């Protein structure tokens, strides 16, 4: 039959419409989460033509995910138990907005079987596995037993709930130290402690149970053998409701602090094809054993001989899922939504590729110079993502002006770079970190950059102990080489002179036309660390000639001083530098020695909070005698509990805090006589 051009176009349009209609999933979806993961889910929903509903606490009213969604409803005040964990309030929003499905993201209610059950009872689709799989895999104790039955390699340990601290000590002794104490429910490094002796076991039991109750509403714990010096490698799985399941390769997640991942990559430098296949097949076997449907992750510890042991299964989307998306080309959120609607998987195992290499850095509002990252709060006075760098993806839920508060996880964003190979992905990550602008809060970019350029990391010689091994005395920042120091000093001096010259002009015209300055040289003093360096600068056109340590360097740039970042060329080498230092004229530097310096505070008799947070418990009162190292109080910051200890033996003079107080960094907590 002959069809005219117009009719042919109409037939084509109708066929495409029918195809689209046949693949329809949901009209409206609620995201039971906040921050970057809520924004991530909304992006895919927009791509699929699904309307979105955001929930938020009162302090998140102006958050990015709220602005991105089609609708947004407040579910309570800032504390998570009254908002993002408030099932009653969330269920009311679902009814009010008539959302047909809920995506839980990660954390909060993502692995809460009661929430999934309540949704099912209301006929609302949970974008994730069914309650049986959540129960089986979300509970570390039950999941370990199921893993054994599915012939998945498991870690030796106690397959039951630990009742109290005394039982924890008895079990730990039977297993043999060191042991890992961890929350039965949940993940993300919360409710996790390593214990090397009885005292640490008792302390770990207390803190882990409290953190687990705070983060997941479930304080049950388990204990297992701690495998010293392992790698943390996980397998992404994807399964549908028709019995099909795939493994989507692995992610290397060994760079961690406080049992939380900091840098991830896919694939791993360590696995060979045979080990990868064996881990993938065991992960799929476990998924099929519990009739799993959705995206999920099976985590393993891998020793130096490539023996691997089941750690846990996360029945949700992982924080680090973007690296898997980069090397496979799959949109995991889209696949989760399709599976939840009942569609079969579109791919076979043979279709899953490893194309190139992807690296993810978790950018946190943390001070990396304190225990590799204690939380920082504040307002983002400047914020600029490095999206101009090729093959960069930034998953974030904040913007310039956003507040980082004590109530939620301190993550600012996930920075992902992709390359045809690992070297290319790492080089792009280095450039992206150099070009990331964050002002107003402390952040961990300096630590991330040091990690990804460290020779051990570049060689793939890593384990979960990487950070304490490489930085045994804590992270101290980048140690400048002599060349880097000279380049930094020359750049800073040139920038100072460029700013001085600009301040003399107004709209390209000298402020006082009759007082034209012909100055072409400057003598400066730059303070870098504990040192003061004399610098001589002379101007030559748009370039500066700078003398440092008796050596001359040529510095050129467009000198766009309105930009938070400047690209400069020092002796032909391009640099993008973010560094804090002080620049003075020679005269000012000579006079500064007469300025009295503030004496350092004697902290041996006082305890100040090292971070903003909430006081969970106070263990002393005025008049008590405390020993050096004894716990004085516990501060919870962004869902992690930290024990504050006495710096010396003495008598308590005054206590300036009580349980329930909110404290800021530097606030006085306790005084000793």
Image (tube, rainbow, N blue to C red):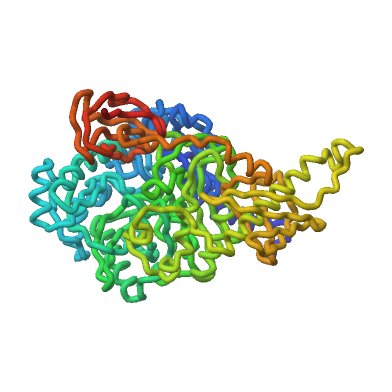
Does residue 46 appear in this view? yes
Q: Quadrant of residue 19?
A: bottom right
Q: 588 left or right of 229? A: right
Q: Is residue 412 above or below residue 633?
A: below
State the residue lying farthest toward the right.
Answer: 514
Does residue 342 appear in this view? no
Specify the quadrant that holds the N terminus.
bottom right
Q: Nearer the viewer, residue 439 or 556?
A: 556
Q: 617 left or right of 485? A: left
Task: Indicate the position of residue 380 as horizontal and vertical percent values.
Answer: 55, 38
Q: 183 left or right of 357? A: left
Residue in the picture at 41% in, 72% down: 350
Residue in the picture at 77% in, 58% down: 543
Q: Quadrant of residue 46?
A: top right
Q: Nearer the viewer, residue 566 or 52?
A: 566
Task: Indicate the position of residue 337 as horizontal and vertical percent values.
Answer: 43, 49
Specify the quadrant that holds the C terminus.
top left
Task: Indicate the position of residue 435 as horizontal and vertical percent values.
Answer: 59, 53
Task: Indicate the position of residue 509 as horizontal and vertical percent values.
Answer: 87, 41
Q: Is residue 8 above or below residue 519?
A: below
Q: 231 left or right of 93? A: left
**How many marks do you count on the picture?**
0
Residue in the picture at 41% in, 31% down: 664
Q: Nearer the viewer, residue 100 or 167?
A: 167
């Amino acid at each position: 039959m002959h069809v005219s051009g117009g009719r042919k176009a109409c037939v084509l349009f109708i066929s495409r419409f029918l195809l689209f209609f046949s693949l329809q999933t949901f009209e409206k979806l609620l995201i039971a989460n906040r921050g970057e993961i809520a924004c991530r889910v909304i992006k895919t929903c927009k791509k699929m033509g699904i309307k979105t509903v955001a929930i938020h606490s009162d302090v998140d009213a102006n958050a990015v995910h709220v602005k991105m969604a089609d609708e947004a409803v407040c579910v309570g005040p800032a504390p998570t138990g009254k908002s993002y964990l408030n099932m009653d309030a969330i269920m009311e929003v679902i009814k009010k907005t008539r959302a047909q499905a809920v995506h839980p993201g990660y954390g909060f209610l993502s692995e809460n079987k009661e929430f999934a059950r309540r949704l099912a009872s209301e006929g609302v689709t949970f974008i994730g596995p069914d309650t049986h799989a959540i129960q089986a895999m979300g509970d570390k104790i039950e999941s370990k037993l199921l893993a054994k039955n599915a012939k998945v390699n498991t870690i030796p340990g106690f397959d039951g709930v630990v009742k109290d601290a005394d039982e924890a000590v008895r079990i730990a002794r039977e297993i043999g130290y060191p042991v890992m104490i961890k929350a039965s429910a949940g993940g993300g490094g919360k409710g996790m402690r390593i214990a090397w002796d009885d005292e640490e076991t008792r302390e770990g039991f207390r803190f882990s149970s409290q953190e687990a109750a705070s983060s997941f509403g479930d304080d049950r714990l388990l204990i297992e053998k701690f495998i010293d010096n392992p790698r943390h490698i996980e397998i992404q799985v994807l399964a549908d409701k028709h019995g099909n399941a795939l493994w989507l390769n692995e992610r290397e997640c060994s760079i961690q602090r406080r049992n939380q991942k900091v840098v991830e990559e896919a694939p791993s430098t360590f696995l060979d094809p045979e080990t990868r296949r064996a881990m993938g097949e065991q992960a799929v076997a476990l998924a099929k054993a519990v009739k799993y449907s959705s995206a999920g992750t099976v985590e393993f510890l891998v020793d130096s001989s490539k023996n691997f042991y089941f750690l846990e299964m996360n029945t949700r989307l992982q924080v680090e899922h973007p690296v898997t998306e980069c090397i496979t080309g799959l949109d995991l959120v889209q696949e989760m939504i399709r599976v939840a609607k009942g569609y079969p998987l579109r791919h076979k195992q043979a279709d899953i590729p490893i194309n190139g290499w992807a690296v993810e850095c978790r950018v946190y509002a943390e001070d990396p110079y304190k225990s590799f990252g204690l939380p920082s709060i504040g307002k983002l006075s400047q914020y600029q993502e490095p999206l101009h760098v090729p093959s960069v993806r930034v998953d974030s839920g904040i913007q310039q002006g956003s507040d980082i508060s004590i109530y939620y996880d301190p993550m600012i964003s996930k920075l992902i770079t992709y390359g045809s190979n690992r070297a290319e992905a790492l080089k792009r990550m280095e450039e992206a970190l150099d070009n990331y602008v964050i002002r107003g809060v402390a952040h961990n970019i300096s630590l991330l950059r040091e990690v990804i350029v460290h020779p051990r990391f570049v060689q793939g010689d890593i384990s979960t102990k990487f950070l304490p091994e490489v930085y045994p005395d804590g992270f101290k920042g980048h140690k400048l080489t002599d060349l880097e120091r000279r380049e930094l000093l020359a750049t800073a001096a040139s920038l100072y002179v460029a700013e001085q010259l600009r301040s003399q002009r107004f709209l390209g015209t000298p402020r006082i036309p009759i007082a034209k300055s012909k100055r072409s040289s400057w003598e400066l003093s730059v303070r870098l660390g504990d040192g003061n360096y004399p610098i001589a600068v002379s101007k030559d056109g748009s370039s500066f000639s700078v003398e440092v340590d008796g050596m001359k360097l040529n510095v050129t740039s467009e000198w766009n001083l309105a930009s938070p970042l400047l690209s400069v060329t020092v002796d032909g080498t391009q640099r993008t530098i973010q560094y804090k230092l002080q620049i003075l004229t020679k005269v000012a530097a000579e006079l500064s020695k007469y300025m009295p310096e503030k004496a350092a505070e004697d902290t041996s008799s006082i305890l100040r909070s090292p971070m903003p947070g909430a006081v969970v418990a106070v263990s002393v009162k005025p008049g008590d005698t405390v020993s050096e190292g004894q716990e004085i109080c516990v501060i919870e910051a962004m869902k992690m509990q930290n024990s504050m200890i006495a710096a010396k033996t003495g008598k308590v003079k005054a206590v300036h805090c009580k349980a329930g107080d909110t404290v800021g960094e530097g606030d006085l907590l306790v005084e000793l006589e």
